Image: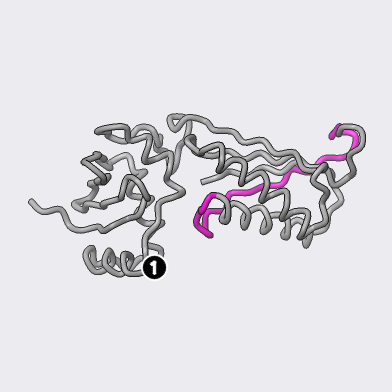
Amino acid sequence: MPLVKIETIKGKSSEYKESLFDTIHDALVKSLGIEDWDRFQRIIEYDKDNFEIPEGKTDDFMIIELTVFPGRSKTQKKAVIETITSDLNSNLGIASTDIFIVINEPPLENWGMAGKQLGGVEQSGNVEELLEHLDEIHTTELGMERIRKNLNLSEMDVIAWCKKQITSEEAKISRQGKNWYIEIGGNVITVNAKSYTIITAHKKRY
């Protein structure tokens, strides 16, 4: 769930800003594998008098701050920076020298969703390891069909539904061997601990 903040000088068109949003989001999808719906972006525009930029930069200069769950590798961070920079240059003609990117990684206890602290789930094992890779959780078409059938779900976005369960304050999460098991609301979701693939979900057997 990357949070994107773009700071730049006023004067750009609505079309430019829409393309800016799309380009950065698509770069995050490519480099981090986030879901397409996972868009939390905003632009903050300044008058020239209120936005001092280094000598040699143009009015296209921007500071992009990405706030992400902790746990990304150096390789992933490098890919994010390079992909955003390259794509902004290709799509909007922004010079690489006008793009400044900062990645922030607040610990999970500093994140809250729907009034609930992400680091506050009931834990067994290092649950933060699972939550830190929340953006990487995925499944196959077959997996989605199996989950819908097993749980009698009408949800179209099964992956988003599973992520919501995993981050719920009521979820009981445990690590057993190669899998994570998330128990919530009488259901059990199984996630592979290496690939972060949702293997299945089923009603809890009592």
Question: Looking at the picture, does residue 15 appear above or below residue 174?
Answer: below
Give x and y (percent) for residue 159.
39, 58
Residue at 40% from the left image edge and 37% from the top image edge: 118
Answer with the quarter of the image where residue 4 lies.
top right
Amino acid type assigned to the residue bearing label 1 in the image: Met
Between 53 and 96, the one lying in front of the other is 96
Q: Is residue 40 magenta?
A: yes
Residue at 22% from the left image edge and 46% from the top image edge: 183
Residue at 58% from the left image edge and 49% from the top image edge: 40
Between 192 and 173, the one lying in front of the other is 192
Residues in magenta, as a range: 32-52
Secondary structure at badge 1 equals loop
Q: Is residue 46 left or right of residue 26?
A: right
Give x and y (percent) for residue 197.
35, 54
Instruction: Count how many numbered circles sit on residues in the image.
Output: 1
| Residue marked by disc 1 | 156
Give x and y (percent) for residue 195.
37, 50
For disc 1, the neighbor class at 10 Å (few under 14, some 14 to 19, many from 20) is few
Give x and y (percent) for residue 149.
24, 69
Residue at 24% from the left image edge and 47% from the top image edge: 184
* The residue positioned farthest toward the left in the image shown: 206
* The residue positioned farthest toward the front in the image shown: 75
